[in-house]
Image (cartoon, rainbow, N blue to C red):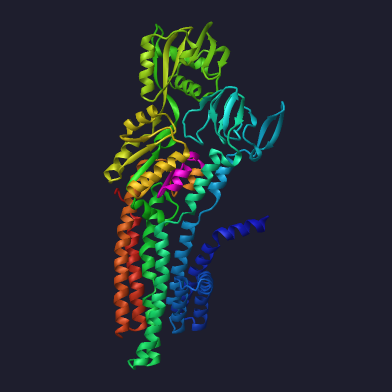
Amino acid sequence: MRSVAYAKLWERHGEAYTTALCAVFVAAGWFASRAGVGLVGTNALYLLGYVLGGYRQAIEGTRTLVKDRELDVDLLMVVAAIGAAAIGYWFDGALLIFIFASSGTLEGYAGARTKRDIEALMALHPEDALVVRDGREERVRADTLGVSDTVLVRPGERIAADGRVVEGFSAVNQAAITGESIAVDRGPGDEVFAGTINGHGALRVTVTRPGGDTLLARMVKLVEDARERRPPAQLFIERFERTYAKVVVIGAILVVALPSLAGWWTFRQALYRAMIFLVVASPCALAASMMPTLLSALSNGARNGILFKGSAFIEALGRVRAMAFDKTGTVTAGRPVVTDVLSFSVAADDELLAIAAGVERLSEHPLARSIVAEAERRNLAVVAASDLQAIPGEGAHATVGGQRWSIGKSSLFGTVSNEISTRQHGLEADGKTVVLIGDGRAQGLIALRDTIRPRAREAIHALVDLGIRPMVLLTGDTRETAAAIGRELGIVEIHAGLLPEDKVSVVQELTRRCGQVAMVGDGVNDAPALASSTVGIAMGVTGTDVALETADIVLTTDELEKIAYAVALGRRALRVVKQNLVLALGMMVVLVGSDLLGWITLPWGVVGHEGSTLLVTLNGLRLLRSSKR
């Protein structure tokens, strides 16, 4: 078992370990040379650094050359490092290997897409189901269910297939699929989805989609498709590397051949100039133009509660021009709270709330728990209820203080006064869920709603100030609820009643319209949209495992205002990278020109090359400093 664990650890982090050891031996060689250790001992240390840091690049570059007949930067770096060592500059070659190995390691971590997000989605799907056939209950594998099968779902179980309820009433938690913040009542004729959680009542469900075509299965496919798409920037970089490697190799050959054949230099002089060319034309400064900058931004973000899963996402976030937000659990707290308690009788509001809490204390419904929590918050004396009679999908009756009370939908009461009905409709238009309470006739109402996160409005305004437009709100909730939240946040473009695939469609349409789009979410149902966006941002505290794995950026403190900071940080990183690229390319042109004109020696070529690398590195390290913008 221990050997298996070590093997998995090496598989995940082996490249990082060898790169770290490469750094150790390169540093040891440098100190040994300063301490007067002989060339054999010093070069042996450098050689270990070469092997540890460069063997992957050597194998990969050779494989690409033999299999694809293509020169790439991996092989170019190895050749340049060996060339430097061949003419006595072991440290420079070893440093080149280490820088390139570090870049490859970091890119590997940034670009590696594991299957954990897919596995987390699949884990939501039950492995088996209790199917009713010929009057008998039989436990079968969920993936064998067919259309028209009848499945019995007990309280607390996950529903194994998409279907329609044919018998029973219950509150079903659909947050994983639709993102609805409150469990929805389901009864005969209502649709339910695989992966959702049944509440307090047993349900009989007729399967309408086979296991491979459930909504959850389609979510998995959406995430897989999004992961397989390679961004245009990555394809451009790969093409550039192949072209760059060919140009440098051809250039080195020409530097050896042409001057010696023309009689300008001797063959030895031409070979010396070619080695200088390989050193000064190597892309160390170009690599350093990006990696120290982006690593500094990564560190800056981590200190400020922003976890970038890779350096590429810093750059991508800096280019974002539009942003979509999931509602439930992202811009809102994700749980209903009591917003209004209104009495239309002689009883005071608090008295009515205490009675409601007495009835609801016996229930496990999310709304009931919220009503009890509000009564406790107000320190009300709650009288225990008795003789509870739950009416599935409607509400409940119970005896409190010797009197029979009802709480729930208006259908529980014979007549509802115009005053109460008007107020109820007004609250529902504001996106609130309303329950009535009375002793045979409605005497008052309690309104509940998922509330926005603290400082969410300020976070949206900060993004607008940065030029992020449009801002879009996506939700599986009703249009009224979404519109009410949108008004509070200042978001105009709202899409409500969405399933996961609908969110993907909205994000894709937004991408066609605006170019670079970020998606912010927290739930399983947000995973496909997070994967389809240019940059996916997940809430780190309340977010589900699937959202956290799928997203490119995680807010470790769930503070929405950090998004504006992250966007500003990405834009600063882009500016610094552009500065560094101009400096690195400019120095490379100067050094290559000086080499061809015979103005510099190899030591000065190395000084110029490493000096430009140091300059762009120091410029990138400026991003370690925090900034408000």
* Residue at 39 percent of width and 74 percent of height: 282
* Image location (x, y in percent) of residue 450: 42, 28
* Image location (x, y in percent) of residue 295: 40, 58
Near-viewer residue (311 or 255): 255
Question: Horizontally, is 337 left or right of 15 in the view?
Answer: left
The picture quadrant where one finds residue 274 is bottom left
User: Does the stretch in magenta take in 340?
Assistant: no
* Residue at 53 percent of width and 53 percent of height: 114
Near-viewer residue (192 or 63): 192
Residue 79 sits above or below residue 627 on the image: below
Q: Can residue 522 be seen in this view?
A: no
Residue 406 sits above or below residue 144 on the image: above
* Residue furthest front as drawn: 148
User: Does the stretch in magenta take in 533?
Assistant: yes
* Image location (x, y in percent) of residue 358: 51, 15
Range shown magenta: 524-544
Q: Can residue 250 be seen in this view?
A: yes
Near-viewer residue (467 or 388): 467
* Image location (x, y in percent) of residue 390: 56, 16
